[in-house]
Image (cartoon, rainbow, N blue to C red):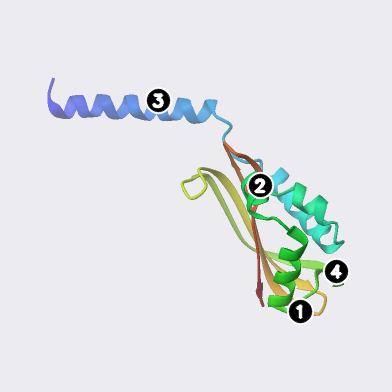
Amino acid sequence: MTRLERFARFFVVAVLVITAVLSLSSCGIDKDEAKEDMLSFLEAVEAERFDDAKALLHPELIEKTTDFATAIHSLEERCGIDFSDGITINKTVNMQYSLYNSDYNGSGYELTFYAAVGEADVYITLRVVENNDGYGVYYFGVDNG
């Protein structure tokens, strides 16, 4: 058997093994569920139900966030907004999905919305991650529009 034949056989076996592993694994995040959780998170932040919003965070983020309400108020101050004035999503401007990302060792689903918070136009980015440590909102960012 030549080197080329051995390589071709190895390549076919490797592709079959990877395909089998991926088909038997969880196959990533359910996009509809992730989007629903993102919207629930925003609703809780808007209503200042910070315990409800914090419950939707990824366990790694919960560990890093000692005072969630203070973190939200700090974000509001930095951006000159008040979420309790209302969050209106005007459109989704970006969507990214990854079956696996080495940054968080799991699957991720990220949406960026163009939204109004009160009178201010902003971009809101949310990322939901599922990995060995759990599932939940892993990133919440706001940029002035």
Pick whichever of labels 4 and 1 is earlier in the sequence. Answer: 4
| Residue most extreme to the top | 1
Residues marked 4 and 3 touching at CB (< 8 Å): no
Q: Quadrant of residue 29?
A: top right
Image quarter for residue 139? bottom right
Task: Pick the quarter of the image with the N terminus.
Answer: top left
The reply to whether discs 2 and 4 touch (Cβ–Cβ < 8 Å) is no
Disc sitting over residue 111 in the figure: none
Q: Secondary structure at mark 2?
A: loop
Contact check, label 2 and label 1, Cβ < 8 Å:
no
Q: Is residue 3 above or below residue 99?
A: above
Residue labelled with disc 3: 17
Compared with 107, 4 (above or below) is above
Label 2 and label 4: CA atoms lie apart by 23 Å
Q: Residue at x 76, y 79 (%)?
A: 120
Q: CA distance from mark 4 to mark 1?
A: 12 Å
Disc 3 from disc 2: Cα separation: 31 Å
* Residue type for callout 3: Val
- Inspect the image, locate mark 2, and give the three-letter code of the amino acid beneath it: His
- Residue that badge 1 annotates: 120
Categorize mark 4 by other alpha carbons within 10 Å: few (<14), some (14-19), many (20+): some
| Vertical arrangement, residue 39 with respect to residue 141, above or below | above
Between circles 1 and 3, the one closer to the viewer is 1
On screen, residue 39 versus residue 125, left or right, reads right
Eyeballing the image, is 31 above or below 41? above
The residue pinned by badge 2 equals: 58
Please name the amino acid that badge 1 sits on.
Ala
At mark 4, the secondary structure is helix
Task: Using the image as rendered, state which of residue 2 and residue 128 is in the foreground.
Answer: 128
Residue hosting label 4: 84
Q: Quadrant of the C terminus?
A: bottom right
